Image: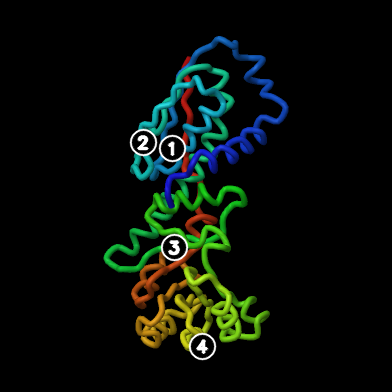
Amino acid sequence: MATIHAIQLNPMITRALEEDWGFGDWTTDLCVPADKQARARIIAKEPTLVAGSEVARAVFLAVDPTLRVEIAAENGASLQKGDLILEISGSARSILKGERVALNFLGRMCGIATLTREFVKQLTGTKVQLLDTRKTTPGLRLLEKSATVVGGARNHRMCLTDGVIVKENHIRAAGGISAAVSRLLESLPPTLKIEVETTNLTEVQEALDAGADLIMLDNMPIAEMALAVRTVRGRALLEASGNVRLDTVREIAATGVNFISTGAIIHSARWSDLSLLFET
């Protein structure tokens, strides 16, 4: 996805600061003189892939536009323990008030990017693209999906209007794959693609006959995925989903699918260990 615009980013930062501040920062306001100046550095405490450095910068500037915030490591940079990410100088109170929210965003995004990169490395030498999913933290989807792109993945749908995925419950409610796809073809804007979730070869054939553009192979055994690839023969794009882990993703790719999607790169990513070092 493209760089997050301030119009999208600022409301997320405002909500996070409101949540963190409550009715005021007693500690900072009562302990730290208003005219105290300081310098701070955000560093990596472990190897990490940087994502969200511009978001952390925006947090500090939202707290106090007079702060000087320099990005030392751009998104996509691979850092080692002790490497500098951000340097902030100006009002000590302002730096302290922005510290936690900036670290929360940055640690979360770096963690997602770092795990995503590990998955992408497993696909080296294949033509398969890794996709993220809509399994994101409510309100933070733009940030989390931005981090997967930094890690080397490609965004799947950002929201429900980006495309059509006819999933298992849709199929049941519509009366079958053919009925669901037929209704979509009657009314759907022609610029949108139709993807159908399938769980076996019979459903794959039905989705193909119905005119699906993409077919999702959901939780299929490896051998059955390989048969699905031979069945489809390039007449639709194939996405493998379900049971995708670091130790399975390359074997899945070897079946010949076009895409592999996994929510794990977001929901199972741990935060990167970062620290803000404060100096007066």
Instruction: Looking at the image, tell me whether mark 2 or mark 1 is earlier in sequence order.
Output: 1
Badge 2 crowding class, 10 Å Cα cut-off, few under 14, some 14 to 19, many 20 or more, is: some
Tell me the number on the disc at residue 131.
3
**Residue 61 on image: x %, y %:** 51, 27
| Callout 3 secondary element | strand
Amino acid type assigned to the residue bearing label 1 in the image: Ser
Question: Which residue is found at the position 63% from the left and 14% from the top?
Answer: 31
> Between 180 and 64, which is closer to the camera in this rendering?
180
CA–CA distance between discs 4 and 1? 46 Å
Instruction: Looking at the image, tell me whether mark 1 or mark 3 is earlier in sequence order.
Output: 1
Question: Which residue is found at the position 44% from the left and 30% from the top?
Answer: 42
CA–CA distance between discs 4 and 3? 24 Å
Q: Which residue matches tag 2?
A: 73
Instruction: Looking at the image, tell me whether mark 4 or mark 1 is earlier in sequence order.
Output: 1
Instruction: Looking at the image, tell me whether mark 2 or mark 3 is earlier in sequence order.
Output: 2
Q: Which residue matches tag 1?
A: 53
Q: Which residue matches tag 4?
A: 206
